[in-house]
Amino acid sequence: MAKDGSLRKVYKEWTLVGALTALGLPAAIYALQNSLLQISFKNIDSLTFSMLNQTKIFFTAFFTYFILRQKQSIEQIGALFLLIVAAVLLSVGEGSSKGSASGNADQILFYGIIPVLVSSVLSGLASSLCQWASQVKKHSSYLMTIEMSIVGSLCLLASTLKSPDGEAMRQHGFFYGWTPLTLIPVIFNALGGILVGLVTSHAGGVRKGFVIVSALLITALLQFIFDGKPPSLYCLVALPLVVTSISIYQKYPYQVKKKES
């Protein structure tokens, strides 16, 4: 912000009321979403989690239509439908297969699948609100990232007053259990927040979601490398559906019909 000259302007024009009005609600939603994701992380494997997490694209499209009146073409609606089919196939298939093998189907469903699906709904709503703030309210994407980080951190700190995590931090300290490797996802998430803010500002929340879907292939590869676990049959069937969905969505954007003079 200092480099592009916007820092001085922001310093003169920024107000607490304006920041909270534009980004207070999405920041709180993202904080709740992150808590749900942490619960889900522990109960399903990384590829299943990543694929289910992409249902947020559907909910982003849904909320951007109602909040910003951003329409989708028929082909794009079909692409979103393919994505939902892949998610349903994955959630039902993975949940039943894991449950029959381990006898722990309820834990996978209620602490793995449902939290990530609820977080997808919240992500779609928050992403649409952020798009509204950046495109309608003309909020700087860098400033938006800073404001949401602060508000979200305050929400999470408040939640530690009553949560088990808060009790653990009071007993062992904030950095208990951290290793140098812990810094990798922390730093990547920090950089990702800036990039997501830029993409949301310039390309919109739905396209942001489709770009993130590309990481599914990397997730499958890394899961095989680090865990020695190949993708399940359900993942192998769902992945082509997701890739096809991406291709269709990008190739057939919504076109505003010109009125004949």
Image (spheres, rainbow, N blue to C red):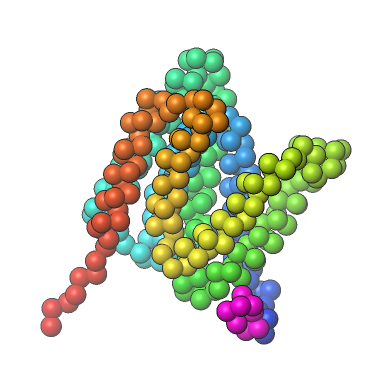
Left or right relative to 225: residue 90: left
* Quadrant of the rendered image containing residue 25: bottom right
Please, which residue is most extreme toward the front here?
225
Drawn side of residue 198 relative to residue 151, left or right? left
| Residue 44, position as x, y percentages in the image | 54, 30
Q: Which residue is painted at 26% across and 51% down in the image?
A: 248
Q: Nearer the viewer, residue 179 or 120?
A: 179
* Above or below, comparing residue 93 to residue 162 in the picture: above
Residue 161 position in % (x across, y down)? 79, 46
Is residue 202 found inside the magenta-colored segment of the image? no
Q: Is residue 29 or residue 12 the one in the foreground?
A: 12
Quarter of the image with the C terminus is bottom left
| Residue 54 in the image: above or below residue 196 | above
Q: Position of residue 9 (x, y in %)?
A: 62, 84
Quadrant where the N terminus sits is bottom right
Q: Residue furthest right?
A: 171
Quick check: 153 above or below 131? Answer: above
- Identify the residue at horizontal 60%, vertical 64% (top origin): 145
Residue 132 makes an appearance in the image: no
Please tell me which residue lies in front, 193 or 16. 193
Image: magenta residue range:
1-10
Relative side of 135 to 233, left or right = right
Q: Residue furthest left?
A: 261
Q: Is residue 154 visible?
A: yes
Q: Find residue 61 and report its horizontal and vertical position in percent.
A: 38, 55
